[in-house]
Image: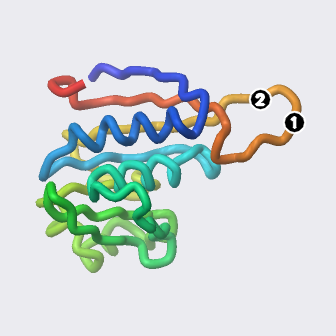
């Protein structure tokens, strides 16, 4: 599988990547969003969901405690999963994982999917890059994105 490595210098670059992928996504797609705390997953998710909903001011709460947040979009249903607190992949059934897969699925902390990881998913790995001096806004740190999958669309 081919990977592309991109340097995202600002929050705007991260949002632009999310917007681009939001225009390419279709029903049945899964995007797996990985990276350590502070890597920009929330920035990416917010821009991705705002693009799909055609609403640049959409409130996008983190599903950290609810584990899944559904959205109705012009492209169909979208489910935003945050699996950080998931008690194991078997708990996904209670969250409606199988039904959600018919729409578009965005998953933060996809490592917790284990054997349920879709083979055809797009993997987006975000990694903060070191910054010399100062104390910049964590959301606006430069980062590296490794995008793997969707060779027919990217």
Q: Which mark is residue 131?
A: 2
The alpha-carbon separation of the residues under discs 1 and 2 comes to 8 Å
Instruction: Looking at this view, name the residue that lies furthest to the right.
Output: 133
Residue 138 at x, y = what percent?
Answer: 70, 46
Residue at the spot x=64%, y=31% of the render?
142
Q: Which mark is residue 145?
A: none
Which corner quadrant of the image does residue 119 belong to? Answer: top left
The residue at the point 32 percent across, 50 percent down is 51
Q: Quadrant of residue 24?
A: top left
Colouring method of the image: rainbow
Horizontal arrangement in the rendering, residue 85 relative to residue 32 (left or right): right
State the residue in front, 75 or 94.
75
Give me the residue at 64% from left, 47% from top: 139
Residue 151 vertical placement versus 26 (above, below): above
**Residue where numbered disc 1 is placed:** 134
Task: Characterize the local packing of mark 1: few (<14), some (14-19) or many (20 or more) Cα atoms within 10 angstroms.
Answer: few
Q: Whole-percent x and y of residue 94? A: 27, 79
Q: Are marks 1 and 2 in contact (CB under 8 Å)?
A: yes
In the picture shown, does residue 70 fall above or below 16? below
- Give coordinates of residue 117: x percent, y percent: 28, 50
- Any part of residue 111 in sight: no
Q: Residue at x 15, y 46 (%)?
A: 26
Quadrant of image for the C terminus: top left
Image vertical order of residue 121 relative to residue 75, above or below = above
Q: Is 24 left, or right, of 47 in this rendering?
A: left
Q: Quadrant of the N terminus?
A: top left
Identify whether 104 is placed above or below 122: below
Secondary structure beneath dot 2 equals: loop
**How many badges with numbers are in the image?**
2
Q: Nearer the viewer, residue 132 or 114?
A: 132
């Amino acid at each position: 599988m081919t990977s592309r490595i991109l340097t995202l210098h600002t929050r705007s670059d991260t949002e632009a990547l999310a917007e681009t992928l939001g225009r390419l996504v279709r029903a049945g797609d899964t995007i797996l969003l990985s990276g350590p705390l502070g890597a920009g997953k929330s920035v990416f998710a917010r821009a991705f969901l705002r693009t799909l909903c055609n609403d640049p001011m959409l409130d996008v709460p983190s599903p950290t405690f609810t584990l899944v947040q559904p959205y109705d979009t012009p492209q169909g249903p979208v489910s935003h999963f945050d699996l950080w607190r998931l008690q194991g992949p078997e708990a996904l059934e209670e969250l409606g994982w199988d039904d959600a897969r018919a729409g578009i699925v965005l998953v933060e902390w996809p490592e917790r999917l284990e054997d349920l990881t879709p083979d055809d998913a797009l993997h987006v790995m975000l990694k903060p890059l070191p910054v010399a001096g100062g104390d910049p806004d964590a959301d606006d740190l430069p980062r590296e994105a490794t995008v793997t999958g969707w060779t027919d669309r990217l």
